[in-house]
Image (cartoon, rainbow, N blue to C red):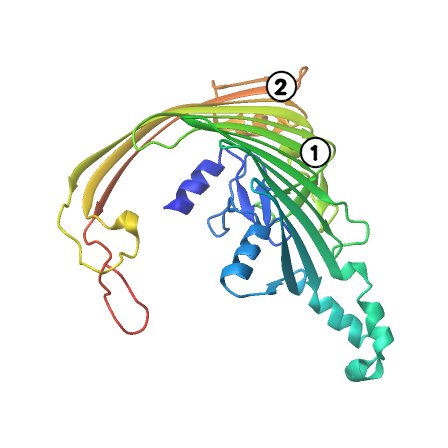
């Protein structure tokens, strides 16, 4: 259900997805194109923080990983404690597959034996074997957090441009504010699997905190600057219209009502942890949602909204002279769920376990 909700949200909002293409470990979906369910959503925790956690609590001094485009790599994070409210992480990556290929080059199967220590040492000086990333998190106030990151992925090509990103979070009593900027910003197209670099991208996101029932809203302002370029792929691929320079604004308001028709109050098995604590109560419930969304785009990127408006007549407006487009939509949904069991007992103790 989480992935299904993510896919629905991705039709309107630009969500992050996990990717091995960058040291940060995340790429943003091309606006207007939701990511498929098979992809994993980008976590709120930066990849350097994930590796640092594994090194500290899982006794893993080096973290090996495998990707199709790089092969086997080895990663290591160094934690730099600055102050109580300021921390920094330095992430290094070594391309093991490329190093072994260079080691055997011009030597056939006995390349390792024929090379002396001096020539092997020179291989370690090849900067294309390395990638370096730096991230810093500053707790400005109890409600304000600033994240800064930069990485240089030398393994791709010698002229790789360092990626830089800054994210500011502010917690209001009833909603969250996020301001992020990246240069260049990495986007992924779900239809072709192509990655695109936008020279500069900035987004301002204001969303109300999730509620079980009640009114919620979401506002987003997005700006792209510069000509997008394909990242490691066929240079003749068509650029998605939503990545062209321009400014877009989106807002959505919805009202949701959840009703418990029946919920069990029976006691659970003692000393048995449920498979999912959120699904540990048998129940019968229903929910309904109704809302409206409005999107406005100015600049070359407004072409995308014109294409989306073909099936939404009488709710769209396009001005070719001003390069602007306005698109509105209303939505509603009704759902019914029923659950029997509290996920504390195994159906079978042999083979694959199933809970009920």
Residue drawn at x 86%, y 75% is 118
Q: Is residue 98 left or right of residue 53?
A: right
Instruction: Determine if residue 248 is in view.
Output: yes
Quarter of the image that includes the C terminus: bottom left
Residue drawn at x 63%, y 56% is 77
Alpha carbon separation for disc pair 2 and 1 = 21 Å
Asked whether disc 2 touches disc 1, contact meaning CB atoms under 8 Å apart, the reply is: no
Tell me which numbered mark, 2 or 1, is placed earlier along the sequence: 1
| Near-viewer residue (316 or 62) | 62
Instruction: Determine if residue 238 is in view.
Output: no
Crowd band around label 1 with a 10 angstrom C-alpha radius: few (<14), some (14–19), many (20+)? many
- Judged from this view, the residue extending furthest toward the front is 83
Residue at numbered disc 1: 200
Residue at numbered disc 2: 324
Q: Is residue 17 above or below residue 306?
A: below
| Near-viewer residue (321 or 356) | 356
Q: Is residue 118 above or below residue 67?
A: below
Residue 68 image position (x, y, % from top left)? 63, 62
Q: Is residue 273 left or right of residue 184?
A: left
Q: Is residue 249 left or right of residue 238?
A: left
Q: Is residue 10 left or right of residue 96?
A: left
Crowd band around label 2 with a 10 angstrom C-alpha radius: few (<14), some (14–19), many (20+)? many
Res. 210 image quadrant: top left
| Near-viewer residue (211 or 325) | 211
Residue drawn at x 32%, y 73% is 351
Residue 27 image position (x, y, % from top left)? 60, 45
Marks 2, 1: nearer the viewer = 1
Res. 127 image quadrant: bottom right
Secondary element at image label 1: strand
């Amino acid at each position: 259900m989480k992935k299904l909700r993510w896919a629905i949200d991705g039709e309107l909002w630009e969500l992050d997805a996990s990717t091995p293409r960058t040291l940060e470990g995340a790429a943003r979906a091309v606006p207007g194109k939701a990511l498929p369910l098979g992809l994993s959503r980008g976590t709120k925790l930066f990849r350097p923080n994930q590796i640092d956690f594994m090194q500290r609590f899982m006794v893993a001094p080096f973290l090996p990983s495998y990707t199709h485009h790089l092969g086997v790599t080895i990663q290591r994070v160094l934690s730099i404690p600055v102050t109580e409210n300021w921390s920094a992480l330095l992430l290094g990556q070594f391309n093991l597959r490329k190093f072994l290929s260079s080691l055997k080059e011009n030597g056939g199967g006995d390349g390792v034996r024929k090379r002396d220590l001096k020539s092997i040492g020179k291989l370690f000086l090849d900067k294309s074997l390395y990638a370096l990333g730096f991230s810093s998190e500053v707790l400005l106030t109890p409600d304000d957090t600033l994240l800064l990151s930069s990485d240089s992925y030398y393994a791709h090509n010698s002229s790789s441009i360092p990626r830089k990103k800054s994210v500011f979070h502010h917690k209001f009593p009833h909603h969250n504010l996020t301001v992020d900027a990246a240069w260049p910003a990495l986007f992924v197209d779900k239809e072709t699997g192509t990655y695109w670099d936008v020279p500069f991208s900035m987004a301002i996101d204001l969303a109300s905190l999730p509620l079980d029932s009640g009114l919620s809203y979401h506002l987003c302002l997005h700006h792209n600057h510069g000509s997008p370029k394909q990242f490691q792929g066929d240079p003749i691929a068509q650029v998605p219209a939503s990545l062209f320079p321009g400014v877009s604004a989106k807002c959505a308001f919805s009202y949701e009502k959840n009703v418990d028709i029946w919920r069990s109050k029976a006691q659970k098995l003692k000393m048995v942890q449920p498979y999912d604590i959120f699904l540990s109560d048998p129940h019968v419930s229903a929910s309904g949602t109704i809302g409206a969304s409005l999107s406005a785009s100015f600049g070359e990127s407004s072409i995308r909204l014109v294409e989306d408006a073909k099936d939404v007549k009488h709710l769209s407006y396009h001005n070719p002279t001003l390069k602007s487009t306005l698109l509105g939509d209303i939505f509603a949904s009704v759902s019914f769920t029923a659950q029997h069991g509290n996920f504390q007992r195994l159906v079978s103790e042999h083979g694959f376990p199933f809970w009920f």
